[in-house]
Image (cartoon, rainbow, N blue to C red):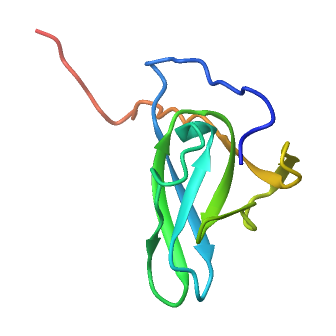
Amino acid sequence: MKMNKNIENPLNTSLQLVPVQFEYTHLTAQSVAIAGTFNAWHPTTKSMQPSGKGLWMKEAYLSPGYYEYCLVVDGKWIADPRAKNFVPNTFGGMNSILTVANPPVMAPRSDCKTSLQ
């Protein structure tokens, strides 16, 4: 599976990576991975780890942006059932949509005092 169009997130080294937690439940799956625009649709570079009772998990660190992705379950490409948005792909299936927002900016604490000498 590949994305519909070339969606690129601008390279900005000042952007902070944001932790994103992926979860999927499948009682009999032998392998689950995530492939999308964030890893050039490579089906094995973001393997999910089994956490018991059919739960698969993966934490990824992504730059803020818009991504299309699929889960690769035992070699079969599927849309993530937990995704909120989807887009048709050129293979007759659906890609899941992930939007990673900028992390909130921390305001300086007013109870902190500094002195410059």
Count of number-bearing discs: 0
Q: Position of residue 26 (x, y in %)?
A: 62, 82
**Left-right relation of 82 to 104:** right
Q: Position of residue 1 (x, y in %)?
A: 71, 48
Out of 78 and 23, give the one closest to the viewer: 78
Out of 64 and 35, give the one closest to the viewer: 35
**Farthest top residue?**
117
Out of 102 and 58, give the one closest to the viewer: 58
State whether residue 28 is above or below residue 113.
below
State whether residue 54 is above or below residue 2.
below
Report the quarter where the C terminus lies: top left
Tell me the residue at 55%/85% (across/down): 54
Tell me the residue at 75%/68% (across/down): 81
**Left-right relation of 68 to 22:** right
Q: Position of residue 4 (x, y in %)?
A: 81, 36
State whether residue 64 is above or below residue 46.
above
Q: Position of residue 58 (x, y in %)?
A: 48, 62
**Left-right relation of 76 to 74:** right
State whether residue 105 is above or below residue 33.
above
Tell me the residue at 65%/24% (across/down): 8
| Quadrant in the rendering for residue 112 | top left
Out of 39 and 21, give the one closest to the viewer: 39
